[in-house]
Image (cartoon, rainbow, N blue to C red):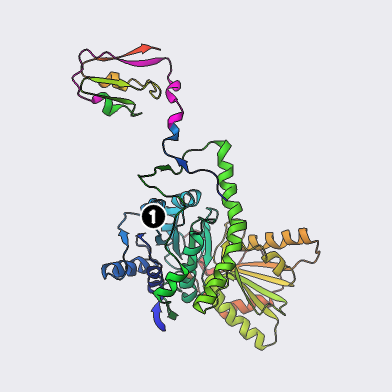
């Protein structure tokens, strides 16, 4: 007998964990971006993606921790109210 | 053809016949000779397998966990502190339903540090969901390894199996051993064909987090499998083994002179050897005494309660102790007999005594074993061979 515990991969993506945010979300301004990818590298949820100078956070999974805002060397990301 | 071989060497050669794909083990006395021999078999080209050099037993167990999940036959061995370091991973292996086969070369647990034999180490993972076998001699240790792979990898079982052998007594002792031919082992043990595996082409999630609404079913499924699928398959596999290899394999337990016995010894592991000798001595004096040797300790053989309830006296002898209570085997025996009595309505129960012996490699003599037969008092956890001179104030 087995518990039905082996699942197709990426089933966790069904859970939109962005709902855990506490009222603030990052906003990518796309003005001064140099494409350094620091926001992409530091995001603990792996939900920042993009290319060249056009990055964004996937708000379905972003927890609003603000680390991308802190790390951005050209202040091109800000926290805003939901 | 029989060969005169060391226990660890025989086990390594038998494991090689089972064609594992990945082996990971970390040296610890008295287990070291097993991975040592497997390494040289691989280096000599006699076994095509990957041996992973790891930095600890935790890594060894983690390594074979991952390898097993990719659908390859795996093997590891350890002892004592090594098993304790593996403990967390062994619970994971069982929970993930991976058919890992391991050998635990039983040794005392620190402190004080002691490298000699007792069976305390395996009691730490008794409740992990692993199937536990105990071998009496080197030949049986080899035979149980072959059966362990077949049982673990059965698509209805999918649980780890730990084969226990007594440190030094079996691992370093020499015995005339019959190693089967490769053809016969291949016939008995077909290549591992996993029902599911980690594969980038067909990704699956193993071991996801579960909440209270799922966890109990995972434990229930293992327990149910132990009590049903494993219970029915162990005797079948033992019978198939006996037929194919021409050597008796007992499955759950071995009965020695039980038919007309009044008093019965119960034990597991290599201690059965000296107990059988004691019984032979007592039988010469027309004493009605026998031995019930437990081979499969988990799942615990359900018939034990029925078998033992008809005797006058049961003497449980073991090399482990749940400090502050009794030996592990003793409490299992008492539970089984009492449960059987409750369900069958019999009122006369045997007097069951529990004795602890041989801890940390302390010798157990035939005289000591024989003396228990004449003892009138009933004990639940009496230590045999305690030297009063070693006890007293701290210094």
Query: Could you tell me how many numbered marks the image carries?
Result: 1
Q: In the rendered image, which quarter contains the N terminus of chain B?
A: bottom left
Please, is residue B163 above or below residue B90 in the view? below
Residue at image mark 1:
B64
Residue B365 appears in view: no
Q: Residue furthest bottom?
A: B284
Q: Position of residue B159 (x, y in %)?
A: 51, 55
Q: Chain of mark 1?
A: B
Badge 1 marks a residue whose secondary structure is helix
Q: Position of residue A78 (x, y in %)?
A: 30, 14
Q: Residue at x 34, y 26 (%)?
A: A47
Q: Position of residue B112 (x, y in %)?
A: 44, 60
Near-viewer residue (B330 or A29): A29
Q: Residue at x 68, y 61 (%)?
A: B336
Mark 1 is surrounded, within 10 Å at the Cα level, by few (under 14), some (14 to 19) or many (20 or more) other residues, namely many
Q: Residue at x 45, y 22 (%)?
A: A20
Is A23 part of what is drawn in magenta?
A: yes
Q: Position of residue A69 (x, y in %)?
A: 29, 18
Residue A18: image quadrant is top left
Q: Residue at x 36, y 45 (%)?
A: B201
Near-viewer residue (B160 or B46): B46
Near-viewer residue (B140 or B330): B140
Residue B42: image quadrant is bottom left
Please state the extent of the stretch shown in magenta in the rendering. Answer: A13-38
Residue B243 appears in view: yes
Relative placement, left or right, of A52 versus B279 is left
Is B199 part of what is drawn in magenta?
A: no
Q: Residue furthest top?
A: A81
Q: Residue furthest left?
A: A34
Relative placement, left or right, of B258 versus B383 is right
Please, is residue B184 above or below residue B328 in the view? below
Relative placement, left or right, of B284 versus B51 is right
């Amino acid at each position: 007998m087995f518990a039905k515990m082996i699942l197709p991969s990426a089933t966790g993506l069904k859970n939109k964990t962005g709902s855990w945010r506490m009222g603030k979300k990052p906003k990518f301004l796309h003005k001064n971006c140099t494409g350094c990818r620091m926001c992409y590298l530091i995001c603990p949820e792996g939900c920042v993606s993009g290319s060249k100078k056009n990055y964004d956070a996937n708000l379905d999974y972003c927890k609003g921790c603000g680390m991308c805002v802190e790390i951005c060397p050209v202040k091109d990301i800000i926290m805003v109210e939901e | 053809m029989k060969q005169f071989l060391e226990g660890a060497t025989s086990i390594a050669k038998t494991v090689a016949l089972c064609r594992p794909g990945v082996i990971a083990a970390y040296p610890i006395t008295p287990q070291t000779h097993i991975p040592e021999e497997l390494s040289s078999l691989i280096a000599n080209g006699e076994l095509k397998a990957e041996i992973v050099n790891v930095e600890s037993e935790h890594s060894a167990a983690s390594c074979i966990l991952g390898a097993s999940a990719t659908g390859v036959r795996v093997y590891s061995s350890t002892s004592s502190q090594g098993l304790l370091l593996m403990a967390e991973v062994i619970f994971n292996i069982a929970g993930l339903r991976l058919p890992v086969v391991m050998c635990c070369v039983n040794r005392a647990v620190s402190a004080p540090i002691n490298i000699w034999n007792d069976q305390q180490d395996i009691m730490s993972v008794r409740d992990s969901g692993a199937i536990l076998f105990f071998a009496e001699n080197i030949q049986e240790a080899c035979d149980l390894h072959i059966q362990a792979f077949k049982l673990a990898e059965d698509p209805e079982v999918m649980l780890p199996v730990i084969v226990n052998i007594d440190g030094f007594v079996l691992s370093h002792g020499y015995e005339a051993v019959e190693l089967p031919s490769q053809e016969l082992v291949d016939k008995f043990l077909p290549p591992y064909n996993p029902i599911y595996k980690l594969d980038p082409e067909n990704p699956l999630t193993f071991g996801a987090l579960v909440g209270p609404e799922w966890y109990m079913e995972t434990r229930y499924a293992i327990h149910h499998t132990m009590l049903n699928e494993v219970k029915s398959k162990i005797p079948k596999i033992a019978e198939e083994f006996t037929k194919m290899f021409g050597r008796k394999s007992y499955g759950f337990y071995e009965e020695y002179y039980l038919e007309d016995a009044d008093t019965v010894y119960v034990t597991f592991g290599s201690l059965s050897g000296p107990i059988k000798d004691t019984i032979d001595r007592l039988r010469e004096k027309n004493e009605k005494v026998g031995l019930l040797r437990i081979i499969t300790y988990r799942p615990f053989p359900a018939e034990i309660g029925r078998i033992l309830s008809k005797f006058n006296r049961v003497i449980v002898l073991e090399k482990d102790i749940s400090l502050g209570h009794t030996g592990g085997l003793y409490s299992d025996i008492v539970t089984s007999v009492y449960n059987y009595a409750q369900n069958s309505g019999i009122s006369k129960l045997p007097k069951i005594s529990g004795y602890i012996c041989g801890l940390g490699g302390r010798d157990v003599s035939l005289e000591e074993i024989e003396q228990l037969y004449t003892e009138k008092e009933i004990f639940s956890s009496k230590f045999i061979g305690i030297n009063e001179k070693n006890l007293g104030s701290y210094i």
